[in-house]
Image (cartoon, grey):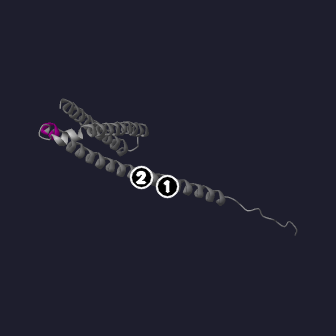
């Protein structure tokens, strides 16, 4: 039975680590939003944050796989002795509910970031369009002004 408690301890530590990683992702999402919210997008910071989040997501996936493997080993022992492991199970349930809340927070912050990025891209697209139009107007003006002082060749009849 002590083996079951050790496995439950491993599961608890895995969930705590997942909560810590989700907290880090939330902080990165806030930094990402700040990097997009300024006048200019800090591309380097934005890409660095995406790379860090990718690493954290892979870590979470590994933790989930490990959690599932350990849980499968002790599933029958736990279900058969729920009274014996009630305090550990309660802790696991509490941690899982915290993870669910944090996962929802991460999803919401990702959605906000996506909207901010789309808004910024739209603003940049508008700026580019305005710049192109300004260049086109300036070019047309230049071409028209060059034609104003242009005198067509004329043929003069010198016979009288």
Which residue is more in the foreground, 146 or 120? 120
The Cα–Cα distance between marks 2 and 1, rounded to whole angstroms, is 10 Å
Element type at marker 2?
helix
Seen in the picture, residue 134 relative to 69 is either above or below; the reply is below
Which residue is more in the foreground, 85 or 94? 85
Which contiguous range is marked in magenta?
Answer: 86-90
Left-right relation of 92 to 27: left
**Neighbours of disc 1 within 10 Å: few (<14), some (14-19), many (20+):** few
Residue reaching furthest bottom? 160
Element type at marker 1?
helix
Which sits earlier in the primary sequence, circle 2 or circle 1? 2
Left-right relation of 50 to 135: left
Q: Which secondary structure is most common in the magenta stretch? A: helix
**Quadrant including the N terminus:** top left
Q: Position of residue 155 (x, y in %)?
A: 81, 65
Badge number at residue 86: none
Which residue is more in the foreground, 129 or 45? 45
Q: Position of residue 61 (x, y in %)?
A: 34, 40
Residue reaching furthest right? 159
**Quadrant including the C terminus:** bottom right
Q: Position of residue 24 (x, y in %)?
A: 29, 36
Q: Position of residue 130 (x, y in %)?
A: 48, 55
Residue labelled with disc 2: 123
Left-right relation of 60 to 130: left
Q: Residue at x 45, y 55 (%)?
A: 126
Which residue is more in the foreground, 102 or 29? 102
Residue labelled with disc 1: 129
Q: Quadrant of residue 60?
A: top left
Q: Are marks 2 and 1 in contact (CB under 8 Å)?
A: no
């Amino acid at each position: 039975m002590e083996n079951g408690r050790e496995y439950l301890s491993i599961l608890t530590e895995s969930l705590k680590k997942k909560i810590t990683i989700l907290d880090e992702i939330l902080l990165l999402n806030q930094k990402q939003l700040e990097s997009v919210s300024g006048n200019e997008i800090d591309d380097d910071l934005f890409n660095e944050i995406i790379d860090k989040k990718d690493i954290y997501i892979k870590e979470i996936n590994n933790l989930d796989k490990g959690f599932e493997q350990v849980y499968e080993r002790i599933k029958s022992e736990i279900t058969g002795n729920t009274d014996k492991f009630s305090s550990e199970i309660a802790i696991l349930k509490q941690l899982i509910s915290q993870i669910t809340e944090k996962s929802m927070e991460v999803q919401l912050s990702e959605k906000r970031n996506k909207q901010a990025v789309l808004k910024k891209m739209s603003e940049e697209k508008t700026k580019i369009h305005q710049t192109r139009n300004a260049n086109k107007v300036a070019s047309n003006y230049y071409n028209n002004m060059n034609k104003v002082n242009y005198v067509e060749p004329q043929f003069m009849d010198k016979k009288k």
